[in-house]
Image (spheres, grey):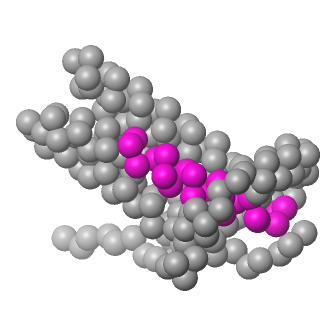
Amino acid sequence: METKTLRPAKAVPALNAASGWWLRALDGIERTTLADPAIRVLQRGIRSLPLGDVRDLLKGRPLGHPLHPVLVQVPIGCWLSAAVLDVVPGERRAVTTLTAVGLAGVAPAAIAGWVDWADQPPRQARVGLAHAASNAAAVSCYAISLAARLGGHPGKGRLWAWAGLAAVTVTGALGGHIAHREADPT
């Protein structure tokens, strides 16, 4: 009996279609100027905060690269680990702990991210605002997940955690786009 295998040539068009859709969506976010007045106000406000030497620390200058990508490893790592343990019987306590530690790690990562974002040119700032919105969605999902788990509803907690992980995936892709897209100041 001969087995059929999926040829890469057939798989690539689907990947290319998804990639094309994603890049078109990012291009749309980069080009829309609807939020620009709010972005300018927020950026000015963040840049005017009297942070002193803490600003350099938050921007990662002592490291030689931004601090934000380092700090996001805590929530992402905790939540991904929690997702793995969510499918292992008897790991409810560990999953709840990882969810809580991930939530605790959000604030430092967010603060460093906002300080970096305040200096971004318009295109990156627009994507950064979408990144922040998807982060807020992820954090909300994980907060609801933690509340459900602590309230004795682990199934509901799992569902909210999976929704949170989906939001983390989107926000990570947006953040990666900001960090690795060719800089275009317009």
Q: Main secondary structure of the magenta part?
A: helix
Report the front residue among 148 and 28: 148
Q: Is residue 101 left or right of residue 121?
A: left
Snapshot quadrant of residue 178? bottom right
26 relative to 60, above or below: above
Residue 177 placement, left or right of 44:
left
Q: Quadrant of the N terminus?
A: bottom left
- Magenta highlight range: 103-123
The residue at the point 58 percent across, 76 percent down is 61
| Residue situated in front as seen by the camera: 148 or 1 | 148
Q: Quadrant of the C terminus?
A: bottom right
Quick check: is 106 in the magenta stretch?
A: yes
Q: Is residue 5 visible?
A: yes
Residue at the spot 82% in from the left edge and 66% down from the top edge: 121
Residue 110 picture location, percent across and down: 55, 51
In percent of width and height, residue 154 lies at: 24, 25
Give whichever of 183, 42 is nearer the camera.
42
Q: Is residue 66 above or below residue 91?
A: below
Q: How many marks?
A: 0
- Is residue 26 visible to the viewer in this orientation of the structure? no
Q: Is residue 68 above or below residue 49?
A: below
Q: Residue at x 49, y 79 (%)?
A: 63
State the image coordinates of residue 6 (x, y, percent, origin top left): 39, 70
Residue at 8% over, 36% down: 90
Tell me if residue 179 comes above or below residue 49 in the rendering: below
Q: What percent of the width, then of the height, locates residue 129?
A: 71, 49
116 within the magenta span: yes
